[in-house]
Amino acid sequence: MSNPQIEIQLIASLVAISCAIPGVFLVLRKMALISDAISHSILPGIVLGFFITQDLNSPILIMLAAGTGIITVVLVERIQKTGLVKEDTAIGLVFPALFSIGVLLIAKNANDIHLDIDAVLLGELAFAPFDRFLLFGTDLGPKAGWVMGVILLITLVLLYLFFKELKVSTFDVGLSSALGFSPAILHYGLMSVSSITVVGAFDAVGAILVVALMIAPAATAYLLTSDLKKMLWLSVCFGVFAAIGGYWLAHWLDANIAGSITTILAVVFC
Amino acid sequence: MTQKIAIQVDDLTVAYNYKPVLWDIDLVIPQGVLMAIVGPNGAGKSTLIKAILGIIDPIAGSVAIYGKPYKKQRKLVAYVPQKGSVDWDFPTTALDVVMMGTYGSLGWIKRPGQREKKAALEALEKVDMLSFKNRQISQLSGGQQQRIFLARALVQNASIYFMDEPFQGVDASTEIAIINILKELRKAGKTVVVVHHDLQTVPEYFDWVTFLNVKKIATGAVKDIFNDDNLTKTYGINYKVAVNK
C-alpha cells in the first residue's frame, strides 16, 4: 500500500468513528432524520465560511457551518411547537430551504472555485491526501485527518465525561429533568457535536453520505446488542469496517469511495 | 393540623399552546400521607406532578418542597414517570435502569461505583426482582417493568415519592406488592403521591386524596372527602361508589 492509500483509509476510519458515536444516540432518540436535516442545511454555513476563510478546513468555517446545523434544530423545534405540523413535516420544511440558500450562493458566487455542488454532496475522499497540513514547512499529513482527529478527540472526551447523563436523558427525559440533568443542555450538546462532526466529515464523504455513517452502524448495532456500551463499540467497528472495506471496493470497481462505503454499510445492515 | 407540610403548591397554572391544563391550583400535602390524585383523562394529573418537579414550566404559581423551591430539594424527591413514557427497547438491563436512580446524588460527570451498585441490588431485592438483574428491559413483563421503576425510585432514598400511574398494566400480584411497599414508605414517615385511576381501590390503598379536573376540586383525608359529591364534581357524571367505612 502506498502512503496516500493508507492516509485515505485512516481518514475514512476517523470519519466513521466520529460519526458512529453521536449516531448511536441519534438512533436511540429516534432523531435519525435530524442528522439528514443538519447535513443538508449546513451548506449555507459552509459557503459563507468559505467566502470568509477561503479554506474548507478552517475552524472558523467549521464553527459557522455547525452553527447553521444548530439553527436547523432550533427552527424545526420552533415550527413543531406551534402545534400546526408534526416533527417530520417541520424537518421537511426547514432543511430544503436552508440547503437551497446554499445552492444559490454557490451558483451565484462560487462557480469557478473548488467548492462545487458535486463536491459538497458526494465528497471526494481520494483527493483528501493532496491537502497537506504544513507546520513550519514540515509535512504533518493530510489536513482532513487532523480535522477529523480533533473532532473525534473532542467527541470521545465528551462521551467519557457525560456518558451517564446522555444515557439517562436518552432513556427517560422526565427522570433526567427531575434529577437535575437538563435534557435541553444535553440535547443541544449532542446536536452541536453532531453538527461539528457532519461539517468536518462532509469534505471527505459529502453531505449526503455522512448520514449513512451516522445512522447505519448504529442501526445495525441496535439490532445486535442490549447494552449501550456494546452498541457504541459495535457501531464503531461497523463504521471502520465499512470505511476500509469501502475503500477497497472503490479501488476494485474504480468508483467513488464514499459511495462504496455506503454500499458496504447497507450490505452490513442487511 | 400539627403535621409538617411536605409539599405546598400556590396558584399553579400550566398551559399547553395557550390552553390551560391546570388552573390556579392551591395544594398542601402534609408529610407522611399516601395520597392519590384522581380525575378524568386530561384532568392534568401527570402535568401537576411534572410541574411540581420542574419538568414543565408553569405560566404562574410556585411550588415548595419543605418550604424551599424544588431545585434546592432535588435529593429529597424521587419520581416514577408513566411506564409508557420511555422506550423499553433501549439497550440496557434491569440493574442499569435501577442504577439511574443514584445519578441524582452523584451529580454531573461522576460515575456510579460499587456503593451505588450495592444500593441498586438492594432495591431490586425489595421489589423481588433480583434474579432479573441482568435481563434486558424489553424482555420484562409490564408488571416487572413497573417494579424496576419502583426500585429505581427506592434507590434514591428520598423523603417524597411521586408516581405516575404505577398500577397501569400490572397484574394483581404486582399491584399488591407495589402498594405494600408504598404503605411501608408511609410507615417510615415518607410522603407518597400517586396518580391513580381505579376509584374502587382508593379507600383501601390511600389515606389522602386530591380530586383534580383542571381545577382542584377537593383535597383532604380519604375518610372525610372521598364521597359521591366530590366524585360527581370531578367526573361530571353522577358517580356512585361504595365508600362506607
Image: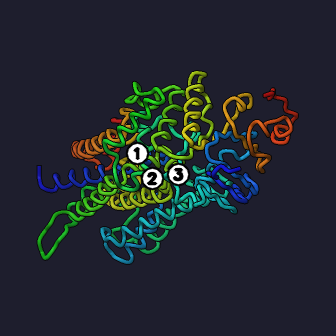
Q: Is B73 drawn above or below residue A51 in the view shown?
A: above
Q: Residue at x 16, y 52 (%)?
A: A6
What element does badge 3 sit on? helix
Q: Earlier in the sequence, mark 1 or mark 2?
A: 2
Give x and y (percent) for residue A7: 18, 55
Cα distance between the residues tagged 3 and 2:
28 Å
Disc 2 crowd rating (10 Å Cα; few below 14, some 14-19, many 20+) is: many
User: Is residue B122 shown left or right of residue A254?
Assistant: right
Q: Amino acid at mark 3?
A: Ala
Q: Earlier in the sequence, mark 3 or mark 2?
A: 2
Work out whether disc 3 and disc 1 sit on a shared chain. Answer: yes
Give x and y (percent) for residue A247: 24, 46
Residue A137 placement: quadrant? bottom left
The residue carrying mark 3 is: A178
Cα distance between the residues tagged 3 and 1:
30 Å
Q: Please name whichever residue, B201 or A125, is drawn nearer the observer in this view of the structure.
A: B201
The residue carrying mark 2 is: A35
- The numbered disc on residue A215 is 1
Q: Nearer the viewer, mark 3 or mark 1?
A: 3
Cα distance between the residues tagged 1 and 2:
8 Å
Q: Amino acid at mark 1?
A: Ile
What element does badge 1 sit on? helix
- Quarter of the image with the C terminus of chain B in it: top right
Tell me whether circle 1 and circle 2 mark residues in contact (CB < 8 Å).
yes
Work out whether disc 1 and disc 2 sit on a shared chain. Answer: yes
